[in-house]
């Protein structure tokens, strides 16, 4: 997902249109790797301004996250705008103090890097498969949205504290 800025650098144009529609497998953010479940769409432009190259794009794609209650995979659509100056590593911080700015190598924009620099506010803190998700049973690990919990009988029993990994075994013995 790299776009060369050669035409802008050589002043052959003042505006570079961006229209990307590409497959990528994963996006990394804060030690997490998210599977990408759609094409990555990036539309917009890069403009030459008095202050430098200005990136103005809309980005959209879908990631796979896990429901924080029941752990099933959930598709999470991500859609946001990236607007700001393109800056090289040795940029003058004061100059861009009040502006959004994104690092690039001076030659081309790597949109995977742009996404990884900007996605932190876009990924939900907590993903749920539905607001009403019942989660997993603490005792037997059953998904309470789809399965019937098998440990109701032991409520208020000492056995309540049993390790969930053994809960299923316990039920096996009970049936014998
Ligand atoms: Zn859920
Ligand atoms: Zn249970």
Image (spheres, rainbow, N blue to C red):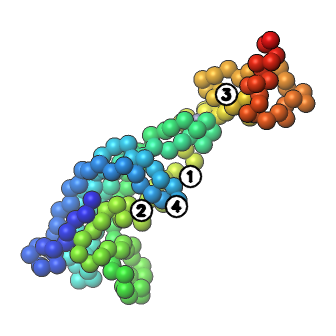
- Mark 2 — residue? 116
Secondary structure under the numbered disc 3 in the rendered image: loop
The label number, if any, that marks residue 30 in the structure image: 4
Q: Is mark 2 within 8 Å of ligand 1?
A: no
- Residue 157, by quadrant, is top right
Residue 88: quadrant of the picture: bottom left
As measured in the structure, the alpha-carbon distance from the residue carrying label 4 to the one carrying label 1 is 12 Å
- Residue name at image x 80 percent, y 18 percent: 173
Label ID, residue 37: none
- Spot occupied by residue 75 in the image (x, y as percentages of width and height): 45, 40
- Find residue 156 and report its image quarter: top right
Residue at which label 1 appears: 125
Secondary structure state at the residue bearing disc 1: loop
**First reached walking from the N terminus: tag 3 or tag 1:** 1
Could you tell me which residue is drawn at 31 percent across and 57 percent down? Answer: 58
Residue that badge 3 annotates: 142
Crowding at dot 2, Cα within 10 Å, few <14 / some 14-19 / many 20+, comes out as few
User: Of the residues tagged 4 and 1, which is closer to the observer?
Assistant: 4
- Farthest top residue in view: 176
Nearer the observer, disc 3 or disc 1? 3
User: Is label 3 in contact with label 1 (beta carbons under 8 Å)?
Assistant: no
| Disc 3 residue lies near ligand 2 with CB under 8 A | yes
* Marks 4 and 1, the one that precedes in the sequence: 4
What whole-number distance in Å separates the C-alpha atoms at marks 2 and 4?
9 Å
Q: CA distance from mark 3 to mark 4?
A: 30 Å
State the separation of the CA atoms marked 1 and 2: 16 Å
Position of residue 3 in the picture relative to residue 113 (left or right): left
Q: Residue at x 57, y 48 (%)?
A: 126
Above or below: residue 45 compared with residue 144: below
- Assess disc 3: are there few (<14), some (14-19) or many (≥20) residues with their C-alpha within 10 Å of its C-alpha: some
Q: Badges 1 and 2: C-beta atoms under 8 Å apart?
A: no
Give percent across and percent down for residue 168: 74, 25
């Amino acid at each position: 997902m790299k776009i060369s800025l050669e035409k802008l650098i050589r002043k052959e144009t003042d505006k570079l249109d961006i229209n990307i529609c590409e497959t990528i497998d994963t996006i990394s953010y804060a030690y997490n790797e998210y599977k990408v479940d759609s094409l990555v769409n990036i539309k917009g432009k890069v403009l030459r301004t008095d202050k430098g190259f200005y990136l103005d794009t809309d980005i959209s794609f879908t990631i796979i996250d896990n429901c924080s209650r029941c752990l099933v995979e959930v598709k999470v659509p991500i859609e946001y705008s990236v607007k700001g100056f393109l800056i090289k590593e040795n940029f003058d911080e004061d100059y861009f103090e009040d502006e959004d700015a994104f690092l690039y190598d001076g030659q081309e924009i790597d949109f995977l890097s742009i996404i990884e620099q900007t996605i932190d506010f876009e990924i939900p803190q907590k993903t749920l498969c539905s607001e009403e998700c019942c989660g997993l049973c603490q005792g037997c690990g059953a998904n309470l949205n789809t399965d019937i919990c098998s440990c109701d009988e032991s409520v208020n029993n000492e056995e309540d504290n049993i390790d969930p990994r053994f809960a299923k075994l316990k039920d096996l013995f009970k049936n014998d």
